[in-house]
Image (tube, rainbow, N blue to C red):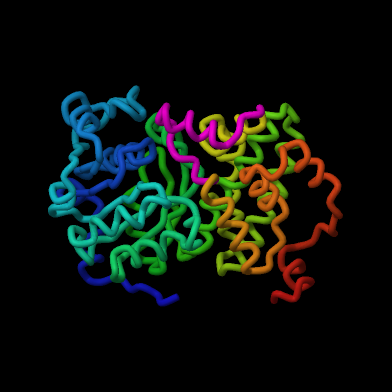
Amino acid sequence: MKRMKSSSSMTNLLGAHQESAEMKVTVFGSGSFGMAMATLVARNGFDVVVLTRREEVAEGINKDRRNPTHLKEFLLPENLKATTDAVEALRGTSFIVHCIPLQSTKSFLESMKDKIEPGVPIVSTSKGLHTETLEMMHEIIPNALGRPQPVAFLSGPTFAQDIMANTPSGAVLASEDIMMSQKLAHLFSGPTMRVYPSEDVIGVQVGGALKNVIAILAGVAEGLGLGINAVALLVTRGCREMNRLAVAMGGQEHTMNGLAGIGDLMLTCLGGLSRNKRVGIELGRGKNLEQVLKERAESLQGVAEGVATTPAAVKLATRYRIPTPIMFMANRLLKGEDDAANLLKDMMEAPMLDDVSLEMEFQAMKYW
């Protein structure tokens, strides 16, 4: 992968944090996480404009300082506005925070490519793998725009509601250019948010994608009433699979052991606000996937990316010849090939290998 260097304009753009009042930030997406990111950046003193599809959302934000559909209990900062006009949202913007679900990103950015300036950095918070192409955001963004673009990727254990409530939180921000990561990280950091710069673009994205797959199964175990022992078993062994695949793809093991890996996994699998875990709970209680997704769509509960990511994760594991039996189990469940109880029984009866380091595992499999 070619390393992207910061231009002088990038250095000037992100140089002085105290100049934030003169800078405009555009946020793509008015869902829960889009609003949380917009609020976080606005609290740091930047003028923020949220691009939304819904007129009623824009009106609610601008007139009442509340999003009427997502996180409406929170009063928004005065320097946070909204519009449905992409040209207006992007006029004079200093950088973009992209909070559109990954599966919808390609078509969205293709419609925006003539409106986005080539030098404006995009910070992506979208998590997952494209169901058909298996691409991650570092591939989707330039392909959709038809050109290179300064990009960075923010991921970590950050529920939107907790960010809005100013709960202490942390994340990792990765770019191929560490100086860009450092500068952008300061823009999101504040009294209740720590953002750690990184160069591990692959690891940060893989962690953010695969933890959703494991979270669905953690929810299934809870929905079946199996107890915390079963959840801990699934989460821990799922973490092992996540690490195997990330490292095989070029990610760093230390990333997977940090906020963007195990930290996000813990939050998504154990936290009560997890969309993916909630899907799993409903599946464990006997509902079918179609019914669960329909109910979520009707109640605007947000996209559970793990549903689309799971089949892509299995394809990637096959491509890299990485054993991921728990992810394969999740895929069989979502495809309706077996019920949860039988799949968990299969997992418990599977052969047990020695518990060794990840490096020794790879050496044994002759991948290294």
In the displayed structure image, the side of residue 92 where residue 205 appears, left or right: right
In this rendering, does residue 162 appear at all? no
Q: Nearer the viewer, residue 300 or 91?
A: 300
Q: Position of residue 285 (x, y in %)?
A: 66, 27
Give the position of the C terminus as an image quadrant: bottom right
Give the position of the N terminus as an image quadrant: bottom left
- Magenta-colored span: 285-306
In the displayed structure image, the side of residue 243 where residue 305 appears, left or right: left
In the displayed structure image, the side of residue 332 where residue 291 appears, left or right: left
Is residue 132 covered in magenta? no
In this rendering, does residue 117 appear at all? yes
Residue at the image point whose x is 36% and y is 53% from the top: 105
Q: Nearer the viewer, residue 134 or 352?
A: 134
Residue at the image point whose x is 29% and y is 26% from the top: 68
Q: Position of residue 193 (x, y in %)?
A: 41, 42
State the image quarter where residue 67 is shown.
Answer: top left
Residue at the image point whose x is 46% and y is 37% from the top: 159
Q: Position of residue 256 (x, y in %)?
A: 59, 56
State the image quarter where residue 243 is shown.
Answer: bottom right
Q: Position of residue 327 (x, y in %)?
A: 66, 51
Is residue 295 covered in magenta? yes
In the displayed structure image, the side of residue 298 where residue 326 appears, left or right: right
Residue at the image point whose x is 28% and y is 60% from the top: 121
Up the image or down, 107 lies above or below 74; here it is below
Q: How many marks?
A: 0
Q: Nearer the viewer, residue 362 or 176?
A: 362
